[in-house]
Amino acid sequence: MTVAVRVIPCLDVAGGRVVKGVNFLNLADAGDPVELARRYYEQGADEVTFLDVTATVEGRDTTYEMVRRAAEQVFVPLTVGGGVRSADDVAKLLAHGADKIGVNSAAIARPALISEIAHRFGAQVCVLSLDIKRSPSTESGFVVTTHGGRTETDLDALVWAKRAIELGAGELLVNSIDADGTKAGYDLELTRLMREVSSVPVIASGGAGSLGDFAPAIAAGADAVLAASVFHYGELTIGDVKDELRAAGLEVRA
């Protein structure tokens, strides 16, 4: 059975507002998160992802009230990440309306967190968010970062992804810091490598700039395509992307 390709808008949130930058830097205001999430739902988004990009850096929880308000207006799965440090944090986010939870920095610091989430709520709830840079320091040429891309680890991105899946991660959100905000297209090499090591769905993230960027990411092995600024600033709509994917012979949800 063919699984439909998912189109996912991503809302990076800081200080209660959606922000967007280039390579995770120079963040600019892009609007109200709940209003944007509702707009994307109305356009046909398959899911909506919220990433609180400063929660870990500031040592605080993610914004529960924002999640609750969004869940009241957006009737597709909500993935929420940023500041999640324990299974109890996950429980609270789910109680406020989230469907899936993204973990990154806390899971790297304590990998058992992945297993705790998967065992308590199911692997489908646990999304491993990978903020990845190209680096000669690892065998694959890709290294994992934490704290919103600010801190480089010594973890090979492919090795860490495989371990996280073994621990119970049910999905990989693969963020290319090098491509982020550049609008030069997804990092197809990174997507292909992740597909080779992953037994769970892969979401390609970072670099979407034109309609022609999305189908190649799926051809490279992504199960879903995630984008931000092209949607936030009205350059493309969810419908535009789905039409383009459909024209490329891919199945998408109506």
Image (cartoon, rainbow, N blue to C red):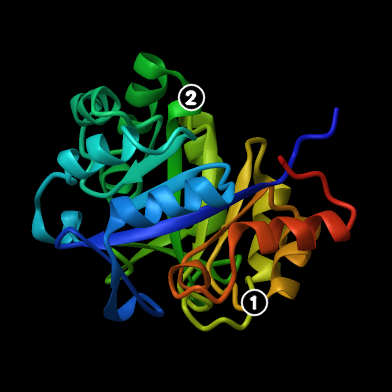
Horizontally, residue 63 falls left or right of residue 235, namely left
Q: Earlier in the sequence, mark 1 or mark 2?
A: 2
| Residue at numbered disc 1 | 185
Name the quarter where the C terminus is drawn.
top right
Q: How many marks?
A: 2
Q: What is the crowding at mark 2: few (fewer than 14 residues within 10 Å), some, or many (at least 20)?
A: many
Q: Quadrant of residue 26?
A: bottom left
Nearer-the-camera pick, 116 or 251: 251
Q: Is residue 225 above or below residue 4?
A: below
Question: Which of the labelled discs sits on residue 77, or is there none?
Answer: none
Query: SS of the residue at dot 2?
Result: helix
Q: Are marks 1 and 2 in contact (CB under 8 Å)?
A: no
The residue nearer to you, when weighing 139 against 179, is: 179
Q: Is 74 placed left or right of 165 in the picture?
A: left
- Quarter of the rendering containing residue 185: bottom right
Locate residue 139, reporting x and y percent: 58, 66
State the SS at label 1.
Answer: loop
Front of the two marks 1 and 2: 1
Query: Which residue was labeled with disc 2?
Result: 123
Amino acid type at mark 1: Gly
The residue positioned 31% from the left and 29% from the top of the image is: 97
Q: Position of residue 168 (x, y in %)?
A: 48, 28
Q: Amino acid at mark 2?
A: Ala
Residue at 10%, 59% in the rendered image: 58
Q: Position of residue 128 (x, y in %)?
A: 44, 43
Tell whether 247 sits left or right of 156: right
Res 243 seen here: yes
Question: Which of 156 and 84 lies nearest the eye of the viewer?
Answer: 84
Distance of label 1 from label 2 (alpha carbons): 30 Å
